[in-house]
Image (cartoon, helix red, strand yellow):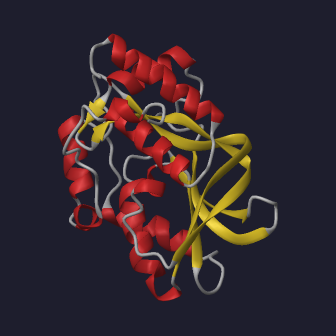
Amino acid sequence: MPRGSHASQHETNLPVLDRNMLVKGMGMLLARQDDPAIWLSSEAERAASLNAFLKYRPAGDICVFAYGSLIWNPAIKTMDQCVARLSGWHRLFCLSMTAGRGTAALPGLALGLDHGGDCLGIAYRIAQKDVQSELSILWSREMLLGGYIPKWVEITDQDGHPVANAMTFVIDPSHRNYAGDLSTPAIIRRLATAAGSWGSAADYLFRTLAALRERQIHDAHQEKIGVLVTSALQCAGQV
């Protein structure tokens, strides 16, 4: 059994945000349950953000670079996918979550792309005719709580050959939810204890690790985090 996979088996019927829920605005409604005082972007704000971003889009189909939950739950229509590398950014639990995967009283964490290093992930290709509709759904999820900046990036294959000019979501280090300076023990504590209406922070971690392994992507740092969170859950009697 892969490391960390057993730790998520104590959770069943987890509320994963699927396409239908996102279209109906359920992400926002559920987030309000976790943190009634949370700031959430409005539909108009997200539409304006998306339209401004698409002014700089390349012609034709576009690629979305996924590095976290978008790998195992893209919830958008895609044509194909491939493993891709993004240089200059690395995968890190650096976004504080007071809703969705945590609460105001017990915040969780989500992954973001922070400066430095590189990251292997999945490049999803969206057909030109579906760009507006699919990115609208994506914006309702990734741009709801704040903390991310949509960005056009150059991705390559694993050997360094250019693949596409893709879009992805990088962390905003100036945002109030930025948590890139947390110590490893603090990260482990949050991931092992926090949960919200979208599921637990630990489940988010373990699903991501499983999805990376399935695609033969090895992230040594996140594997270490997985081992430590599993240990913490075992000590708490949750696995």
- At a point 78% along the width and 69% down the height, the residue shown is 162
Residue 155: image location, x then y, percent: 71, 63
Between residue 80 and residue 147, name the one nearer to us.
80
- At a point 44% along the width and 79% down the height, the residue shown is 132
Horizontal relation, residue 204 to residue 103: left or right: right
> Quick check: 90 above or below 223?
below
Quarter assignment of residue 74: bottom left
Residue 84: image location, x then y, percent: 67, 61
Q: Is residue 45 visible?
A: no
Residue 232: image location, x then y, percent: 40, 16
Horizontal relation, residue 224 to residue 235: left or right: right
- At a point 25% along the width and 52% down the height, the residue shown is 28
- At a point 44% along the width and 23% down the height, the residue shown is 229
Between residue 29 and residue 68, name the one nearer to us.
68
> Quick check: 18 above or below 28?
below
Q: Is residue 70 visible?
A: yes
Quarter assignment of residue 202: top left
Horizontal relation, residue 229 to residue 173: left or right: left
Residue 153: image location, x then y, percent: 69, 62
**In what quadrant of the picture does the C terminus appear?**
top left
> Quick check: 119 above or below 62?
above
Q: Residue furthest top?
A: 235
